[in-house]
DNA sequence: TTGTACGCGTTATCAC
DNA sequence: GTGATAACGCGTACAA
C-alpha cells in the first residue's frame, strides 16, 4: 500500500495540513518541522495521489496535444512528431504530463470536446492546426478551455498561436535562388488550400518584387505534397509556355518527387533547374544531387507552444501570437548552377 | 459549473447511488429509472469527473507509452510514431487515454518510475524497448505495474511482449534475393548490438542454409543506421576480398545511403548489385532505382501492444509473447537483375 | 505556527 | 430495486 499524507503526518508527528503546506511551499512553516516532514516523506517514499490532488484543486496537471494520428502519418508527416517531442520536453520540465488526443475522434463526436473539459482530463490543449482547426477553436473558446494553436488558425480571432515565420522563410529561400543567378522562378505548393504553402509563397513573391521581378508563371499546387505526385506535377511544369529555371518547393517529399521526375527527363538539377525546398528530412541530402533546404526547427516550435500554454495557465486571459524564426538555409548542390 | 452526480440524482428524483449504478450498468435497476437517469444526464450534459472516479476506484484509465523522444527522433525514427498512432487508436477504442512518457527523463531519475506508480498516473505502460529496457523492466516488475514491451526485451523473463517476426522477415527477403538469382549475399545491420538487426540476420542465414549456401562474407554493421553512413560502409564492402552481388540491409536510411554510394561509383543497382531492405519509407520508391523493401505494419504492432495491455488489465497475471507477421515484400527494381 | 473539520465527486457496501 | 453513508487522499478555511 502506498503511503498517504496521513502516514507522513503521523511519522513526522504533525497534522496533515502541515504536511500539505510543506508540499505547497507555504511560507509560515518553521524550518525544523519542514525538515521533519521532508524526512518522513523520504522514509515512506511518499508521493501525493494525482487523483486526490486533482479532485481537491480541480486540475489535472496534464496538457492535451491534439493532432491527426492515423495510419502512415508518421512516415508521411514526421514533422508533427518532432513538434510533439518538443512539447513533451517543455511539459515535463513544468511538471505536467502530456495526454495524446486524436483529431480524428474528437471531430467525429461533438460531445467529445465538452467531455474533455467536464472531466477535467486536461488543463489545456495544444492544437496542431489542420482543416478542422476552426471547429476546435470555436469549441475551446466557448468552453473556456485554455488552448494554443500551432499554425496561424484564423488570424485576429484573439486566441494564442505560434508558428514558424513561413513568409520570411520563403523570402530567404527565394533570395538565395536569386543570388545564385536564377531568374525564371516558380513556386510549387503542397496543396491549394494549405496555409503554410501560401505563406511561403508570399515571401517568394515579395523577394521577387524586391529584385524587380515578377513570378514568371503562377504557382502550381499538388494535392497532398507527397513524393508520388512529383511526376504528374513535372508534366504540368514543362507544358507551361515558358519553363522556369528554378523551383521553390513547399516540402521535401514533393521536391524529391519533382527532382526525380526532372532528372529522368535528362534535366541537370542545379545547372538547368535550381531547386530549394522546405524542411530537412534525412533523405534530402541523399537525392542526386542533394537538395538545398530550409531547415526548420520544429522541436523548438513545440517547446514554444507549450511555453505559451503555461503562460496562459499562470495568467488567465493572456493572449499572444508568436512567429518563430528558427531556421537555417542548407545550400546544397540542387541550387548551384 | 459542470454538473455533478448530485445534480443528476436531484433532477431524476433518485439517490446518487442509483445514478452511479446506472453509469456502471448495474443489473438490478428498473428500466424506468434507468431511462429517467439517462435523460437527466443528457439534459445536464453530465460527465463524471475523472479525478473523483480515479480516487474512488484507484485507477486512472490511462496507459503510459514510454519511448525515446528527443530532438530529430521523428525524422530519423518515424516508425516509433507509427507504433504510437496504433497504440492511440486501440486505447481510445477501449476508453483509455494515452500519456506520453519519455525514457530520457525516467531513466535519469530513479524515483520517477516509482512515482508513476505511487501517483497512479497510469494503470499500465507500454515500453518501446531500447538499450535501457532491462532497467525499466526490472522496475515495473518490482513495482507490480502491468506492462508490455514492444520488441523482445530479455526473452524468457516472463513478461509480456510483442514484436514483428524479424527472423522470418529476413528469411522472406533472402529467399527473394536467391530466387532472383543472386548468390554472393551479405547482410548489413544498423548497429552491432541492435537486436532487430540480429534477428533479421538469423533469418538471412537460415535462408542461405536452406539453399545450401553460406554467407560469402560476415555481416557488416553501421553505427546508427543513418543515411550518411552509407558511403563509409560501401568503402568497407568493396575492400572485402570478394564483392557481394546482393545486400540485405536492415533499414531504409542505411540502404538508401549505400545505394547512393554504390551508384556514384558506377555500380548498376539491380543487375550488378541486388538490394533489399526493411521498412517502407515514402522515399524508398524514390531512389534510383526504387528500393525493394519489406513493408512492415507498425501501426498494427502498436494496436497489438495495446491489446495485450488490456488483456493483462482484465486478467491480472496474464502473460503472452507474441510474434507478429504483418509484412509484405514490395519487389522493386533494386532487386531485379 | 499548527491542528480540526469539511468539501471535492465518485464508488461500494450495506440496509431497507 | 433503491437509498444512505463511509471511504478514497488532499486542500483549505478557520480555530487555537
Image (cartoon, coloured by chain):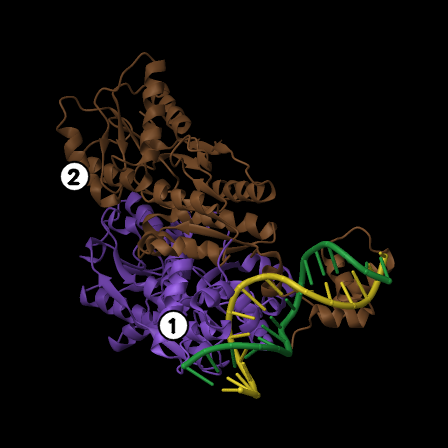
Chain colours: A brown, B purple, C yellow, D green
Q: Quadrant of the N terminus of chain A?
A: bottom right
Give the secondary structure at mark 1.
helix
The residue under label 1 is B307
Same-chain status of marks 1 and 2 = no
Determine the chain carrying the residue at label 1.
B
Q: Give x and y (percent) for residue A70.
A: 32, 55
**Which percent across, then down, holds residue B83?**
38, 61
Check residue B329 in the rendering and tell me which mark sits there, or answer none.
none
Residue A219 placement, left or right of B20? left
The subunit letter for the residue under badge 2 reads A
Side of D5 where B27 appears, left or right: left
Judge the density around disc 1: few (<14), some (14-19), many (≥20) Cα neighbours within 10 Å: some
Residue A309 place in picture, x, y as percent = 53, 43
Looking at the picture, does residue A72 appear above or below residue D7? above
User: How would you rate the neighbour count of disc 2 (Cα within 10 Å): few for under 14, some for 14-19, many for 20 or more?
Assistant: few
Q: Nearer the viewer, residue B62 or A92?
A: B62
**Residue B290: horizontal and vertical position, in percent?**
23, 50
Contact, CB < 8 Å: mark 1 with mark 2? no
Q: Kindly identify which residue carries mark 2.
A: A232
Front one among B36 and A305 = B36
Amino acid at each position: 500500500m502506498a503511503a498517504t499524507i496521513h502516514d507522513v503526518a503521523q511519522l513526522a508527528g504533525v497534522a496533515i495540513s502541515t504536511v500539505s503546506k510543506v508540499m505547497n511551499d507555504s511560507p509560515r512553516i518553521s524550518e525544523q518541522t519542514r525538515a521533519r516532514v521532508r524526512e518522513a516523506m523520504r522514509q515512506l517514499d511518499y508521493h501525493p495521489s494525482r487523483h486526490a490532488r486533482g479532485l481537491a484543486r480541480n486540475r489535472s496537471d496534464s496538457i492535451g496535444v491534439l493532432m491527426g494520428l492515423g495510419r502512415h502519418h508518421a512516415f508521411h508527416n514526421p514533422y508533427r512528431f518532432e513538434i510533439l517531442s518538443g512539447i513533451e520536453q517543455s511539459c515535463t520540465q513544468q511538471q505536467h504530463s502530456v495526454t495524446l488526443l486524436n483529431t480524428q475522434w474528437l471531430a467525429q463526436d461533438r460531445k467529445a470536446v465538452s467531455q474533455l473539459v467536464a472531466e477535467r482530463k486536461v488543463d489545456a490543449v495544444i492544437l496542431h492546426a489542420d482543416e478542422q482547426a476552426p471547429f476546435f477553436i470555436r469549441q475551446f473558446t466557448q468552453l473556456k478551455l485554455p488552448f494554443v494553436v500551432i499554425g496561424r488558425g484564423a488570424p485576429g480571432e484573439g486566441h494564442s498561436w505560434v508558428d514558424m515565420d513561413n513568409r520570411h522563410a520563403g523570402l530567404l529561400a527565394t533570395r538565395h535562388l536569386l543570388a545564385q543567378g536564377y531568374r525564371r522562378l516558380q513556386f510549387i505548393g503542397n496543396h491549394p488550400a494549405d496555409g503554410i504553402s501560401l505563406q511561403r509563397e508570399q515571401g517568394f513573391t515579395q523577394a521577387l518584387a524586391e529584385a524587380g521581378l515578377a513570378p514568371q508563371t503562377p504557382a502550381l499546387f499538388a494535392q497532398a505534397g507527397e513524393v508520388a505526385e512529383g511526376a504528374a506535377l513535372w508534366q504540368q511544369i514543362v507544358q507551361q509556355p515558358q519553363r522556369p529555371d528554378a523551383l521553390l518547393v513547399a516540402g521535401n517529399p514533393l521536391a524529391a518527387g519533382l527532382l526525380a521526375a526532372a532528372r529522368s527527363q535528362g534535366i541537370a538539377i542545379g545547372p538547368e533547374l535550381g531547386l530549394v525546398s522546405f524542411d530537412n528530412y534525412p533523405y534530402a541530402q541523399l537525392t542526386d544531387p542533394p537538395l538545398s533546404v530550409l531547415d526548420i526547427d520544429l522541436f523548438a516550435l513545440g517547446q514554444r507552444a507549450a511555453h505559451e500554454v503555461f503562460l496562459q495557465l499562470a495568467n488567465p486571459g493572456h493572449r499572444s501570437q508568436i512567429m518563430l524564426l528558427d531556421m537555417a538555409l542548407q545550400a546544397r548542390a540542387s541550387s548551384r548552377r
